[in-house]
Image (spheres, rainbow, N blue to C red):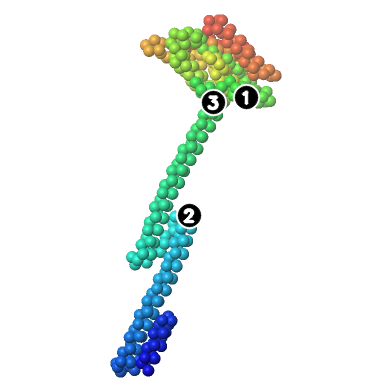
Amino acid sequence: MLTSLLVEGMNRLCQGDFTYRMPRNMQRDTEDTAAFLVNAIAEELERILRSVRHQELQLTASIEEFSQAFTRVASGDFSVQVKRDFSGDSNDVLAFLVNQTVLELGALVNARQRQAEEERDHLEHLIQERTTELRLLATKDPLTGLLNRRHFFKLAEEECARCRRYDRPIAVVMLDLDHFKKINDNHGHAIGDEALRLTAAAMRKELRQQDLICRYGGEEFVVLMPETDAQKGYEVQERIRAGIAQIDLRDGDKGVPLRVSIGVTQCHPPESVEQAIDRADANMYLAKSAGRNRVIMTP
């Protein structure tokens, strides 16, 4: 009887049935002792099996969680963190290493993104600066900051058209720096450039914001004064002439006197801006012929 029960118990264990238990008589005899041993073996094997199955489930869940984490990281999500149980086992250590790696990768990516944004902002700033410079070069004289000739004529034609439309006066001025070649020859082009800048500054000081001031070429300047007749233009230019004569330009300890000859006229429809400038230019040459450092006006 004992032998047949032992054989049946062992067969069950060999077949993987760890839930089978041999009946005991609790008499602590040979038969009961054998049943106790077989049952103890079965219980231990069942415990081991449950533990292995639990670990398998944990391993499968960990693999899935790690896989999801890596997928999110690959898509650029560095906020993901794998759950830890802080048991110190291999899965917990692996989760710790994954989390640390993700944090470090996120920090590196964020730093690179900030660097890329800074580089982009710097590039945009440079482009904006260059665009502004190109716009200024297209409209301004680089030495004096006054309107260049091309842009002056564009604005002058628009202003003359407005004044013709509303029958308003507009004064035209031609100004030339006297003996400018001698200034360059005797004092150098740096002093000559400074003379042109100071002349431009003196003109801006007396003229209004709506007046158009142009470096016409070399030492010549043209001014268009809207809502201004020839007489009023003459009075303003007299102040400009006197102001330029007071400029204290020096080459070392030598003074460099500045004098200008100015011609003033008034644009009369339907004449063009160029025609009015030609008449102002003729008046300017009359001023030079009369001894320079003066203003000559014709209506």
**Which comes sooner in the sequence, label 3 or label 2?**
2
Q: Neighbour class for label 2 at 10 Å: few (<14), some, many (≥20)?
A: few
Residue 226 location, x and y as percent?
60, 23
- Residue 226 visible in the current orientation: no
Amino acid tagged 2? Ala
Q: Which mark is residue 74?
A: 2
- Relative placement, left or right, of 111 versus 124 is left
> Which residue is disc 3 drawn over?
137
Q: Residue at x 62, y 15 (%)?
A: 277
Which residue, given by chain and number where applicable, does mark 1 sit on? 154
- Relative to 289, say whether 216 is above or below: below
Q: Nearer the viewer, mark 3 or mark 2?
A: 2
* Residue most extreme to the top: 290
Question: As rendered, which of 250 and 289 lies closer to the eye?
Answer: 250
Q: Where in the figure is residue 252, as x and y percent of width and height?
A: 38, 12
Rounded to the nearest angstrom, the CA distance separating label 2 from label 1 is: 58 Å
Badge 2 or badge 1: first in the primary sequence: 2
Q: Is residue 129 above or below residue 67?
A: above
